[in-house]
Amino acid sequence: MNYALCIEKMINHIAIIMDGNGRWAEARGKSRSSGHRVGVRVLEDIADYCFGNSISTLTVYAFSSENKARPKKEVDGLVKLIKEFFVKRLPKFIKNETRVVVIGDKTFFSSDVQAIINNAEEKTAHFKNKTLCIALNYGARDEIVRAVNKAVAAGSVVNENSFAQFLDTAALPAIDIIVRTGGEVRLSNFLLYQAAYSELFFVDDLWPDFNTEKLATIIEQFRLRNRRFGK
């Protein structure tokens, strides 16, 4: 069944906390970096599924602001993987007309990595129907603080609606579903402002074990929920 095309509850935006790459690799006697590489392949499968089923926006938590505190070897491996991802996948993004958006504080990354990320965003900015949003060095508290400072600098008096325009996600639709893999039941500083009325799903599968069938099951469960938005 093509769940994403269900008329009465269209899904525009799914966000995923991709947790469990390191634990998956360690359980198999492999390096944590190898787990992150497998995780990238799963991300590609999930993105293809979403965009193939009329879900216009997929946001993924790839590198949190807290991840910088991990061992240097793992952080360096993650940054290398991020760099490779944008370089190798850019032709596919262009071919598939997928807009790439990066949220978070990019100043953590070296100038060459920032240039690669910026290039991917610029080369795909004109695509409208599919958006892959990648959270890098992202933390929701940091995002909110930066948004407040933007509003102050603009001399803007804000309300709930106008404040959202200062957030990193200003150009993205409201989030319908947030999924976290890996067995943890928390948002871990991910899209706290935007998650106010998102439907939350926590699954035990580590990210490398997640797949499109499991996402389809979540979408089916989403259809059964009554979204009242406080009314």
Image: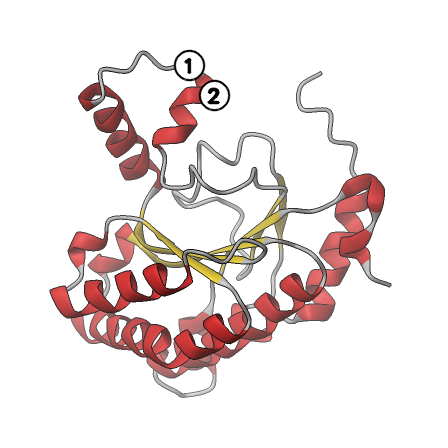
Q: Is residue 195 left or right of residue 63?
A: right
117 relative to 169, above or below: below
Residue 161 is labelled as 2
Pick the front one: 91 or 167: 91
Coloring applied to the structure: secondary structure
**Residue most extreme to the front:** 126
121 relative to 32, above or below: above
Residues tagged 2 and 1 counted as in contact (Cβ below 8 A): yes
Identity, as a three-letter code, of the amino acid under mark 2: Asn
Q: Is residue 35 left or right of residue 58?
A: left
Q: What residue is shown with label 1?
A: 159
Position of residue 195 measured from the top left corner of the image (x, y, whole percent):
52, 36
The span from disc 2 to disc 1 (Cα, nearest Å) is: 6 Å
Position of residue 47 measured from the top left corner of the image (x, y, whole percent):
58, 66
User: Quadrant of residue 119 in the image?
Assistant: bottom left
Position of residue 101 measured from the top left corner of the image (x, y, whole percent):
40, 55
**Residue most extreme to the left:** 111
Q: Residue at x 61, y 61 (%)?
A: 204
Q: Residue at x 28, y 15 (%)?
A: 156
User: Quadrant of residue 50 in the image?
Assistant: bottom right
